[in-house]
Image (cartoon, helix red, strand yellow):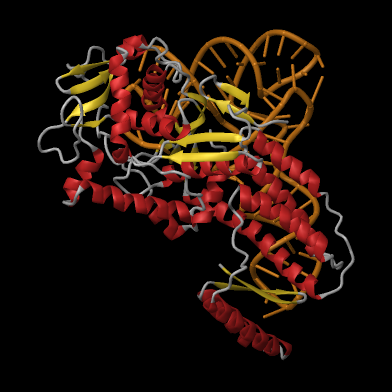
Amino acid sequence: MALQVYNTLTRQKEEFTPQREGRVGMYVCGPTVYGHSHIGHAKSYVSFDAIVRYLRFIGYKVLYVQNITDVGHLTDDADEGEDKIEKQSKLDRVHPMQIAEMYTRSYFEDMDSLGVLRPDIAPRASGHITEQIEIIEELLKKGNAYIAHGSVYFDVSKFKEYGKLSGRSVEDMEAGSRVEVNPEKHHPADFALWKKAQPEHIMQWPSPWGKGYPGWHIECSAMSMKYLGDTFDIHGGGLENQFPHHECEVAQSECATGKQFVKYWIHNNMVTVNGQKMGKSLGNFVTLKDAFKKFDPLVVRFFILQSHYRSTLDFGDEALHGAKVGFEKLQNTFRNLNEEITKASRENRTEEAAIDLPVYESRFRAAMDDDFNTPQAIAVLFDLSRETNALLSLETKFSIGSLSAIREVFRKFGGTVLGLITGESGVTSTDVQLEADLMKLLIEVRADVRTQKLWSLSDKIRDGLKNFGITLEDKKDGTGWRRG
RNA sequence: GGCGCGGUACCCAAGUGGUAAGGGAGAGGUCUGCAAAACCUUUAUGCGCCGGUUCGAUCCCGGCCCGCGCCUCCA
């Protein structure tokens, strides 16, 4: 069964076949960096992270490009309003590029915490002004755009396929228009490619049409095609950007090149809070930095992957708590398995565990092949977890070989693909080593105390450690400990 | 008004034309000094409502109700 991907362009699942065998070019709309990232960003980029990881896992060489929007994204109607970055810079009384730089760093910091692999290229819009101007010139040359008072607009009437991605027609939009039409535009659906800058505008660049700055949509066309070619395999982004942003990208790109822009469009759904969309303009958003104070970033990642990327995800404390406990269950299994492997390495065991790992592997891959169904893939991991726990609780002690085989499956699927299972040492810093030695000593002392049945003293140690965030677990063959 | 999505147990959330994954919470049990962890058993005769197609529908079709998204910036 080959990989099936839901393509917004055709509104159905399709077998995934990249244009060049073995290689995938993928572009995902990145953040506009004028504030800290929120849960919505997390859902989007964690989802695409899982997609990239899986594509690589099944053997594709993926070039993953994700832009940073640091200019041109306006606060209001796509062709009016103020530049978001510049607005924030005025509020904070610092240079716009300082705002962009600060929140770009903040963004990557949060994504790193979530275990999101960095894109291969993270181009800045402000660093690609010339590429954007080139496309605009091409569009003017071909008659797909027009100049009005120093600004340049895309002429929607010249692209008869406008609306094919979002499934709407220009006529439909006129009827429901809620926004006052910019008088410079020939048609309400026309959109800005280049905006003339007022003298006080900080971010402006010279262009054939005078000083100005680029419209929002053009940056993605310029940067994606620069690094991935005129036609590339996957373009991803949030559902709310399907229209107008992505529709405009298609229009301007295909008019400029005369070729198909993107083969597969992948849109991820929104995060809601109490059933309502979470958005910057609604003021009900939760920043990741705040969320991480209450929940481990990997718990947030797990929570996100437990629902499908095309479903909405309702963010709430109760649900997050459920995710926390479930995630810990998975981690416990993996830790216990590692401990058992350590023991097995010191003993001569020959018993093989009867566990059908290939079945787990094929179930996992079938889930991911079906439009990246991470919730189902995680369910497979839980099934494996339960069977592993059952094996570990048996009297029989299994060989290091059969235990390691199980660990490999956890590492591959839980680690490499889903990015949930990380760590398990390899490198131990001196602090970690000291901690381990101290814990070993404490546990030994407590064991002595317990043989003398001095329970209150024994519990004092356990309760005290609990206050430091360390949990002791007494098992048949000794006491284990963990953080949390 | 136009376009689109969803309504699955107490909560989160997959899914299939043949009788409902997984996680959390709850209940009972095993283990244990106790706790924690883990394991076993259990928890929707039912998948918004009403019709239709079918041997059979939660899944297909039609209608209705409710919620949500896009059509203005947003991942």
Q: Residue furthest right?
A: A350
Q: What's the residue at 67%, 51% (across, down)?
A: A412
Q: Establish if B42 lies above or below A426.
A: above
Instruction: Give the residue displayed 62% in from the left and 47% down from the top.
Output: A417
Q: Quadrant of the N terminus of chain A?
A: top right
Residue B41 vs B44, above or below: the answer is below
Q: Is residue A281 left or right of residue A364?
A: left
Residue A155: in sight, yes or no?
no
| Position in image of residue A434 (x %, y %) | 56, 81
Residue A240 or A183: which is nearer the viewer? A183
Picture quadrant where residue A273 is located: top left
Q: Please identify the quadrant where the C terminus of chain A is shown.
A: bottom right
Q: How far across and down, in percent of the image, does residue A324 sit?
A: 56, 56
Residue at horizontal 20 percent and vertical 42 percent from the top? A87
Q: Position of residue A232 (x, y in %)?
A: 50, 28
Q: Position of residue A274 (x, y in %)?
A: 43, 41
Vertical comparison of A25 with A117: above or below: above
Q: Is residue A59 left or right of residue A144?
A: right
